[in-house]
Structures are given as structure tokens and as C-alpha cells.
Amino acid sequence: MTYKSGPHFLQIPGPSHVPGRILRAIEQPTIDHRGPDFQALAKEVLAKVKPIFKTESPVVIFPSSGTGAWEAALVNTLTPGDKVLMFETGQFSTLWCELATRIGLVPELITGDWRHGVDAAAIEAKLVEDKSHEIKAVCVVHNETSTGVTSNIAAVRKAIDAANHPALFLVDTISGLASADYRHDEWGVDVTISGSQKGLMLPPGLGFNAVGPKAMKAAESGGINRSYWDWNHQVGMNRDGWFPYTPATNLLYGLKEACDMIMEEGLDNVFARHERWSEATRRAVKTWGLEVLCQNAEEHSPVLTAVVMPEGHDADKYREVVLDKFDMSLGSGLGKVKGRVFRIGHLGYFNDLMLMGTLSGVEMGLAVAGVPHTKGGAQAAMDYLTGNA
Amino acid sequence: MTYKSGPHFLQIPGPSHVPGRILRAIEQPTIDHRGPDFQALAKEVLAKVKPIFKTESPVVIFPSSGTGAWEAALVNTLTPGDKVLMFETGQFSTLWCELATRIGLVPELITGDWRHGVDAAAIEAKLVEDKSHEIKAVCVVHNETSTGVTSNIAAVRKAIDAANHPALFLVDTISGLASADYRHDEWGVDVTISGSQKGLMLPPGLGFNAVGPKAMKAAESGGINRSYWDWNHQVGMNRDGWFPYTPATNLLYGLKEACDMIMEEGLDNVFARHERWSEATRRAVKTWGLEVLCQNAEEHSPVLTAVVMPEGHDADKYREVVLDKFDMSLGSGLGKVKGRVFRIGHLGYFNDLMLMGTLSGVEMGLAVAGVPHTKGGAQAAMDYLTGNA
Amino acid sequence: MTYKSGPHFLQIPGPSHVPGRILRAIEQPTIDHRGPDFQALAKEVLAKVKPIFKTESPVVIFPSSGTGAWEAALVNTLTPGDKVLMFETGQFSTLWCELATRIGLVPELITGDWRHGVDAAAIEAKLVEDKSHEIKAVCVVHNETSTGVTSNIAAVRKAIDAANHPALFLVDTISGLASADYRHDEWGVDVTISGSQKGLMLPPGLGFNAVGPKAMKAAESGGINRSYWDWNHQVGMNRDGWFPYTPATNLLYGLKEACDMIMEEGLDNVFARHERWSEATRRAVKTWGLEVLCQNAEEHSPVLTAVVMPEGHDADKYREVVLDKFDMSLGSGLGKVKGRVFRIGHLGYFNDLMLMGTLSGVEMGLAVAGVPHTKGGAQAAMDYLTGNA
Amino acid sequence: MTYKSGPHFLQIPGPSHVPGRILRAIEQPTIDHRGPDFQALAKEVLAKVKPIFKTESPVVIFPSSGTGAWEAALVNTLTPGDKVLMFETGQFSTLWCELATRIGLVPELITGDWRHGVDAAAIEAKLVEDKSHEIKAVCVVHNETSTGVTSNIAAVRKAIDAANHPALFLVDTISGLASADYRHDEWGVDVTISGSQKGLMLPPGLGFNAVGPKAMKAAESGGINRSYWDWNHQVGMNRDGWFPYTPATNLLYGLKEACDMIMEEGLDNVFARHERWSEATRRAVKTWGLEVLCQNAEEHSPVLTAVVMPEGHDADKYREVVLDKFDMSLGSGLGKVKGRVFRIGHLGYFNDLMLMGTLSGVEMGLAVAGVPHTKGGAQAAMDYLTGNA
């Protein structure tokens, strides 16, 4: 790749910047995954990752992408032909729905407009309707990476409870974990799905399932034919610090470091800084006269902001200008908003000055690309940050 | 873990030593997996990995363990209820058979004694018998990591051809690739399965399927319900340098470096040094008066040597002594040879002096653990190496 | 140290950000400094460093700080009691003068106001006056790190020539090399002094002397008692790729990488981006209503900008606020401007977005610290960068 | 450099193997050497390095080679024309003597045979003779890296005391520190000189002076013209965690890690394993029928073993064979034993199996190079190690 001076600004909503401390942990020599040093490491990591999910249930760690962890959640708890209720928050909920179909499930996707979070009332209505309890699971995305909308997971739980429905509750917080407030146990989630390359600040390569007791019970007796994704094997062997097949040892080194970093800082501090950057970013967008894709003030993602391009301007051409002139990667519009939005990631190993570099780059890019806008967005962000320093 | 002076001797048959050059490649900042730099990297890696398998067909790369790649090979090419013919070379062929059962296939496992490779004649007999072509695939392990026996893959191909049988030919060379001679195209293999943490010298976390045209055709129309493991998605997107989900970017950096290192040295040189270490090791074992598990001179693995413990001595206790006193990890006996054999890995980023350290450690461990043996094994290895320097 | 999210902004005028590529080079295993691999490395590095100085003369590399390289330049070319002519551009020229005194030379320091570069006319006048040629060397600082003033070295050369004076010409470009235009041969410099931790983007630990033929001749016959700093030993052994004592091998790995990076980009491109950042920074300072220490438009340093604090405000207290609130290190005022100026480093492995993060941090810090200023400095910089993207 | 499989065996007596843990520490981003994080680091390192020298006096750390630290010791404590008494233990004592001459001192070098340590009685005799106390310092090498002979420093101290002579006592333990027992305070040493790249397991680039009160007093009033090497500046600024010029920050990161590693293990354990490897090595040499250069059993260096080549065989040709065939660097004969001895380094980050690899490589090299010897040396070492596991 062409030489560029200075660090690349990787401002997509994940993979996020991997801190040197984590890269150096990953860089340690691989060890025997059947030896005592590994066993101690595994026990430590498996324990340390739980508070990140705010759960006391086991967290299963796969050498996989986040989508692998989606598949794992479904194949462990459901059987072919099972009906699952999903909500179209954006591209990732849509992909999850496709995945469910491919593996033999029968998803019902409640249509959404990609500008709002999950409509808990719609979920409740569907569940109330489902007298015979054909719906076996409710699957929602916590933080929609394609839209920058964060759904109210507690409200969905309440909806399920209000409908007095026995469906399992599966939540994808691949891009939300360790950036946006998330509470597996308190919110009564049965399976939480996540990945390594967002708030956990690791390279991609690990998928996670936090598995509550009801989900575990479903997995013990049922599930779709599976081997790699099988929880029973994992949880059984994890108890003693082992894995059923060779784990991604070096990423586990990094995960231990990531958990330590997050706990040193404190989850509440982590969440607060993400909220702060998100607010600053929205002020910039507003000043530019552009529109934030997310329309509900209570659902703005602390992780990323999706920005709607003015009519007649292609978001991907704009992104190319930014990459070329300012060495910054912005997220593209995915699926049905392709070319119409770009996304600014403001998550993970990041800080105020990186945010100012990022927003300045967005603003300079708008000018260079000839996208109509009002100057002063970065200044507005700065004013907000200064007032909350 | 307790501080130890000097590098750990990781002499299990994989994960193998990861060279600093590869660790430093992996340590580079994660990039946008949808950007042009990644695209260039992916194209390069996908091209560079093919000659390692000696194939011109596509090689699919999963963020997974090697067992994941097993599963991928099966779910892409077979349908539930399909009969597959397998051969019990040791623990890994046995596990593969269990996996096949779990995902709804009907494996027939030809019994073996764990001391020999695949019996091509037995395969042929079974195929000849199978007039109605119910057997859809023949699945064998090239290098049995649990026994140190390398099977003759060309002979199995001949057997299939002799039987004039249309079964697909699936070969696991997870621990053989880039250490033992292997030729996907020439040997008419339909799917080759491998992993990153052995001859490729990477940390664990990548699984591979080299997919020949017949297998690809089977996958296009058939296969078991799948999403993560689906080849069609992968190969289609790979063509342009993309992946259907977030790939393990940092391991791909390492893979590029590994391919470069292997090609700089030349595959034939790589194979030759593994053969040489294997011969030296066997001379040591013979001098100690111990037995090599592999009984056929033509099937000795160049990757590892499994050694039978004298009656009345526990291999795992011996291994603990070696780990404790000499900071060396040896491979344990797996499955039905647990406690009865130990395994010496001599693969990957390794050299003569590391081998001498290893064999000296084995010999010193035998003395310290009170295992009956004749001194001079390391000396015998040294004599061999000297004569072939 | 307390955990901070995101990368530290090290915006002092050196040490500058060390790129990962260089850190990874440095991290390679140390090799035998008397073996063939080292010899090849040394020859390569010693050749590659010359074009950075724009010289064909030898460049001597010491395991030392930049001040060590000052001392080396003096002790190799002068004898105790020799008179040397210096010019007070700021703190570093002052320290160099003190050093000269300590090692037995008799410096005459032409007084400066710390806001201008070297006055070539004043140098010429002194030399013209010195009929008996008692002045043995003229020593000036190219880029005054304490003030952000870059002197016209070609003009000083002209002054020496105009005076027809035989004095040696010694130039410190510790903080200028590989950031500000510099030409050892063309400008007739006899000894150029530099260090590793500025434009060369390395950690501190290497000192450099580019040694022209006249200086080398002086060193062969004269000089002050010396051993470590002795050029003759170095240059003699360097010819074959050796060093007279154990060199800082790992920093030499980094130096090779740094030379490659600089040459890949091209020196002119390197200089141009530094000039651009410097101009953008001054526009920010001007907008804030603050004063740049450097008073001559033609002498603004491309490497750093020193900013004068408003009367009644302490620069060091301000810097503490910036460090505490925005995790950015700014340079302190040194010597007689301590507390009265702060310095913004904009050099080396850096880019537009890092600069915008930096200037935003300076502006936010002014607000948080209650330093009177007009908002909009970062915006002004952005406007300039946009117009020159 | 040509690609080689497996790690290089760097078995010269320093630079020694740098552990990954230290390389990763060094690889951290450079920080502001005038900021609070650096200050905390410096205080910590300056405190942690003292117990390694077994002193409570200050230890001055230079960005330099070990030879730089020699020069520092002399220029701080002596004045031009001072007589110093030295003892020819080998090449490094000879070089130190040359250095003394170059900087204006008048060394008297007591002749040695390069096969024994310092003759304390000879020192005593010279001092007794020196009624007028013209000798201002006694300078000896603790561990002669060129010969593998370790001198009895306590005995030299006794000799000075017995002579009731006021000379300063300067000791070079560049290659002995943190490998061979050394006690600055207890042995009444005035200045101890060391370097980073041996027992401290760092890359080269740091020089050390442990400075006792008598030496410090001498430095305050006297010394040779100096600036870079000046202790007063260093010690004064070190008190608050600062350095008089830019320190080699990244090596200081490594030094902190090295001190932690050594103290985790315990100095006595460190010394014991070096003694053990040294004894094993000598047994190998004896079995080969070769001669150890060191002739006094009580003076064998725990750090390295110098081996005399049989008449008619060139040690350097032999070393080339070992490097070429077995990728191991052995130390060359230096100065007057060039070509006649080779040196085996067995120090630092090293272990039993690395030693066995090393000795096997030496033995195989003897065979390949056609050097007459008796086989079985490695076996003899193994027997010794086994008996002492």
C-alpha cells in the first residue's frame, strides 16, 4: 500500500483501533493449549469477560466472526422449522434474518424504516397474537451498526413479559458491547451475541455468546445439528480451562488485556465517553446542515453516527475523497442505504483529539468533495467538548 | 505464569513456534475490511496460499479452527443422511467421524490400529462393494497428528479410481500442510482441509478449504443447511478481494508473511528439513530403546514422532517432569493412547539446534523421571545430522 | 501511569511519534555485531543515511543523544583554547555554547533575541574583524527547537565566504533534519549534527555527524583528547561495515526503515507537508489572537511553532491542563522563555487529521484554562488545509 | 539476509538474546521526556537498577555503549596526567588501557597471560611501591569477555586496603553484571561500569556507572573536561526523575522490565543457573579433548567459555562453518588470540535446552569442519545437567 505519513484514521464502526497494549499482548508466543499456563489463562479470561456482558452466566468464545456467533446462538437453541421473530432495524438485522432462513428457521421480520430502533409494542403485539407459542425466539439487534440506532433492550424484555410469551430472547450487541450500556442479566436476555473487533478493541477473530440458563437448557436437549458451534462441549470443557478444539490463543491474550483495560477504566466511564463523542458528533452534523439517519433522540448510538448525504451526492464518492485526501476510512452505507449515507465510527480506543481530527476530516472532505454544507461543525463539536471537559 | 529463563520449547505437533517476522506482521493495525488496502491484501493472500496446497482451485479461508474447516468441507458437499467412508488412523480421524455423525451424516469408519496409515486396499474394497454409490465421500487424514503416521494420499486416489467410484475425496492435512509433501491437484483431492497453526507457522485462528471443481459443483447445488461455512458466498466475494463477513484481518497479515517465507525457502527445502528432523528423531528413539508408534517405515510423519512409553510408566507424568524441569511442552497421547504415548513435534519454524535441544530435553527427562532407557539418543541424532549437514 | 483511552498526542518538537513500522523493525532480535548479517545491515544503513543529509561525505553514527553529537563535532575538529563563534538563537545554541566552554573551548556567543534566526551579517562582521583567524569554527543551530525559528544556513555560508575566513562551519540540525530542507554539501557545511528522535522518527538514542572533507582533515591531525567520539576509528571501521564498539543495533534496524520510508515518500514531499502544517498552525495562532514567537516570516520553522502566552498567564499551567484534559503533551518554554511560551510540535510521522486534533486540543485547552483568546483557530487551520488538500 | 528456519542461536558473550517481554516493552511509543509519566518511569528505573549492582549509591545511565561508560568513569574521577594501574586480563582490559592513554591518562598495565584473572598480589605490590600515591586509580575487568576469566574483585579490594593506598577502585563488569555474582558496596568498588546488552538482556545502547561516594567526591571537584559524561549533571537531575539531555527512553522501558524479570527470579537464582551452564560447558569441552582458555578453576566465567583451537586449525574458519551450517554465532578470538580461540556465550535469557542446542552445534561444527575432537561432549553436558536438574 502507498506510504502515508501518520496513523490512518480508522473511523468505521468497527473494526476499531487496536491499542498497542493489546497488539503487544497478541504478539506473545503461542503456547500449548493443553498445558497448565493455557489453562490458567483460559480460566482468567472466561471469568473476566463476564462482567463486560454484565452476566454471571457462561460466555462461550468462538474462533469466528460476529456472524458466526449469530449462527451459534440460533443453532444451539432452535430446531429446523422454528419460527423466530425479528425486527428490521437495518442491514445487520436483515442479514441475521437471511441467515436464519438459510439454516432452516422461519423468521418473521417486522418491517422497520432503518431510522428507528426496535418497536417493542410491535413485538408485543406479535407475541400476543401468537397464542400457540409458535414463535420460539425474539431476535433483535442492540446497536445497529448500519444505521447508528441503539434499541431499548429492556423495553423488548418488558414486551415479551407483558405478552407472557415463552420465546427465547436473543440480542446481537456485536457493535454495542463495551461501548453502549448493556446488561445481559438485568435485561433478561437469554443469548447475547458479540464480537471482538468493536468495543473490545481487538482485531476480528472472536465471536461471543453469553448464554443464560433458559437458553442453555434449550441447547442441552434441542438445537439444530451442529458441532463447531455446540455450547455443551464448550461450556463443559471451559469449566476446567479447556476448549473442545484449538482456540485462537493469541486473541485470547488480547482479550485478557482488553478486559483489564476496560475494568481499569470502569464500564460507566467507558459508556460516558462514548455518549459524549456521539453528542459532539451530532452537533457537528447538525451544524453542517446534514441529517443524522437516526431519528429518535433517545436512540442515538454512542458508537457511530450515520449521516445522510444531500440529494444528488454519492456517499461512496465522498468517502473516497476523504480516504484519498485525509487518509481516513469512513463507513459506507450498507444495503438499501448504500451510497446515501456514510457512517462515522467513534468507538473504542479513541479520544477527544482523535474525534476532532475525525470531524475535521469529515468537514474538510465535504468541502473538497463539493458537498453542500455549512462550515463550523468541528467548531460546534469542540465547543461541546470544551464545555464538558 | 512463573518466570522462566529462555524461550519455551513448544514441541507439540502444533501450534508450532510462530516466527517473530509473522508475529510482527500480525501486530500491524487492523484496517478497514471494505477498503482498497484490504482488497489488495486479500487478493494477494488468496493467490499466494494456492501454491502451498499445490492447487489452482480456490482456497477458502475461514476465521475458525481446523475442526471448523472439517465441518465446512462436509456441510458444503454432502446432504443429511449421506454415507461417508472414513478410515481410523487415530484420534483425529475418529473425531472427524463423530463430527460427521453430529451433523447428520452416516459415516462408516474402517477400523485401524493407530499405528498405520490409511489402507487404500480396504478403501477400494469398500467402494467396489458399494455398487449403488451410496458412499458420497471418502474422508481421510493425511498426517495423523495423534500418531505421527502420514498416509499415502495418492494411493487412496488410485483406489477410488480403481473402484471407478464417484465419491468425493476429502483430505485433512491440518498438520501436514507446508511440512509434508502435499499435492491437491496432482493427487485429485476434491477438498483439502487445513489450519494455520502448524506448518504455516501462524497462531491458531484460520481454517482452510482448498476446493476442487467437483466439490464446488456439489456445493453449488447441494450441501447441508449452512451460512458461515458456505463456500459460494466466500468464493464469489473473494474474487474481488472481499469476504462475506469480517475476516480475521490480522491473521491474514501473518498468512501473507508465512506464504512469502515458505516460498522464499522453497517447498522442497521445507519438506526436506522436516524429513531430516524426523529421521534424526527416530534414531534417537531407537537408541533410547523406545518404540515409535508408527510401524511402517514409509509412513513416518515428517511433522512429529509419537513415542510409546515402556509398560508401567505414564506418559503424562513424564511430560509433566519435562515441562517442569526443562520448560518443554511435549504432546500428550490422545484418546485411546492417552498416557501410553508422548509426541515430539518437530515442525515449522525450527532448526537443527532446536531439535538437539528438544531431543536432549526428552533424554534428560527420561532420566529425571526414571523411565528405563539407554543413553545416547541425542548423540545418535547428532551423528545423523552431522553426516547430513 | 493512569489508563487513557486512545493514543497520546505527543506534540512536543521531538521525540516525535515513532511509526509502528519503525517500532516493529526495532523489535527484531539483536544480532552479532561482528557477523556478516550485521555487516550487510551497517553498510546499507551508512549508505542510506547520506542522502537524508544531502551529502556524499561519511555520516558517523553514535549511540548517544543529540548533545553527544554536538560534543563529537567539537572534540574532533578543535583543540583546547580554540575560539569558536556562536549565535544565540535560543536555548539550544546557549547550551551548545556552555558545552564548548566545559570542554575547554572559548566560545563567543553573538547575542540574539530568541525571536530571529542567525544574523549572517553579524557573523560576517565578526569574521572580517578576526584578521588573525583565531576563530576556528562557526557553530549555528539550523532549527532552534526552543523558539521555532529556522536559520538561513546558506546565508551563513555566504557570510563566511565573503569574509574569506577559514573557520570550519558546524551546524546543528538535530530537530530540522528530514523535516526542514537541509543540504550539507550544497551549503558547504563542514559538520552537520543531528539526532534520531525528530524528523527521523526513531526513539532517541542515536547521534549523527555528517563530516565533510575539511572537517575530516582537521580530525585526523588535531582535535581534543577523545576516544568514544573519535571519527577516525568510526569512519575507518565503517568502511567495512563495522563499528569500533558495540553499536545500538536495534536502533540501526529502525534507522534503515526510517531511511526507506523517507525515500519512498521523497524528501521534497516530506518538506512540503511540514511547511503546510506550519502555515496552518500559524493561521490558528493568529486567529486565537496569540503571538508566534518567531518574528520573521521567512524563518518560521516547519517543525514546530512556539506560541507566546498572554501576559499574566503561565504557559506551564496551561500545558498541564492540556495534558490532563486532552492527553496531549506540548513543549514547554525553555531557559529564559520558561513559562512564557509553549511549543507545538508538528513533525515527523504526522498528518492533517492529527494536526487538527492537535490544534483543537490547543484551542480547547485555552478555553478550559481560561486563557484569553478568540475562538476559530482550528477552523482557520482547517480552511487553509482544505484549500490546499 | 538469507531466510533461515528457526531462531538464530546468538551464542556470543553479548549481545545476548533479548526476551520478547523486553522487546515488547521497548516497542512502546516514546513519551515526553519532560512529562510526569516519564518522571515516574525514570525514578522507578533509577531505583530498580541499584540492587542489580548491589549498591545504594546512584547509578548513572548513559545513552552509550559500554566503552562509553568506561570513558565516563575515567573522565569524571581523574585529571590529565594521572597515573592509573591496570591489569591485562585480556582484550578488553587492553582496550581500556588504550582509551586511558587517548584521553590523557598515564596507565600502567600489569602484564597478564590472558588465561588468568587479576593478580591481586601484583596489584598490591605496585601500590605498596607507590609511596607518593601517584597512582590515582586501580582499574580492573571483572569478567573478561575475551577470555572467559572472572577476576576476584574482593581480593583486589583487599590488596588496595592492605597497601593502605588511596587510589580509586574502578571495575568493569560490562559482561558480568546480572550473570556473575557482583557486589559494588560490599566489595568497596568506587565506580562500577556496565552495559545493557549482556546479563541485563537488553539491546545495546545503555552504559552504566554505579558511583560510590568517594568517586562522586572526586567528580565534584576534579575530572577531565567533559560534558556528556558528566556525573554531576546526571545525578542532580536524576534525583527528580530527569536527565540532562534526551535519554534513550525506549531502552529505559526495557530496563525497567529487565530489572523486574531479574528480581522476580532472584539474583542468586540467576547466578546459579549461569554457574551450572558454565560447568556443563566445560565438561563438554573437556570431553572433546579441547582446552578451556581459562586455567584457574576458581576463575571460570559463568558467562562464557573460551575454547582453544587445536594447533593448525583456524577458529574463525570453524566459526564460519557453524554459522553457515547451524545458524549459530560463536564469539571470535579477539586481539592476540584471534583465530586461536572461539567463545561460547551462555548467558542471559537462556536455558538448559538452548545450552544443549548450543553445545550440540559446537560439536557438530567440529565434525563438519574437520577439527580433531572426541565425540560425547554434549552427552557429558547432558549428564551433568541431568544430575543437577
Image (cartoon, coloured by chain):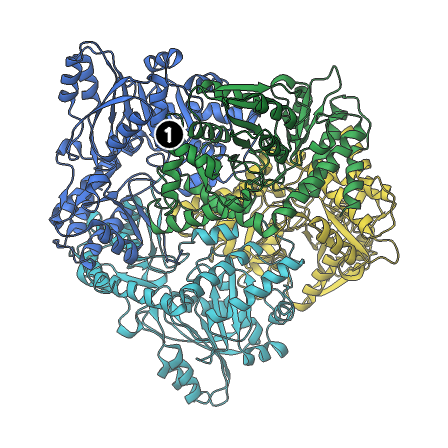
Chain colours: A blue, B green, C cyan, D yellow
**The quarter of the displayed image where residue C324 is located:** top left
Mark yes or no: residue D388 visible: no
Residue D261: x %, y % from top left = 57, 37
Amino acid type at circle 1 is: Gly
Q: Is residue D288 left or right of residue A236?
A: right
Q: Does residue A20 lie above or below C10 as drawn?
A: above
The N terminus of chain B: image quadrant: top right
Q: Does residue D126 lie above or below B48 as drawn?
A: below
Residue occupying image coordinates x 77% and y 35% = B378
Q: Residues within 10 Å of mark 1 (few under 14, many from 20)?
A: many
User: Closest to the observer: D12 or B267?
Assistant: B267
Q: Is residue A19 left or right of residue B279?
A: left
Q: Is residue D6 left or right of residue C375?
A: right
Residue C201: x %, y % from top left = 43, 58
Letter of the chain that mark 1 sits on in the rendering: A
Residue occupying image coordinates x 43% and y 67% = C177
User: Closest to the observer: C97 or C34?
Assistant: C34
Mark yes or no: residue C289 visible: yes
Q: Which residue is mark 1?
A: A68
Q: Secondary structure at mark 1?
A: helix
Query: Farthest residue toward the front?
Result: B131
Residue A152: x %, y % from top left = 19, 25
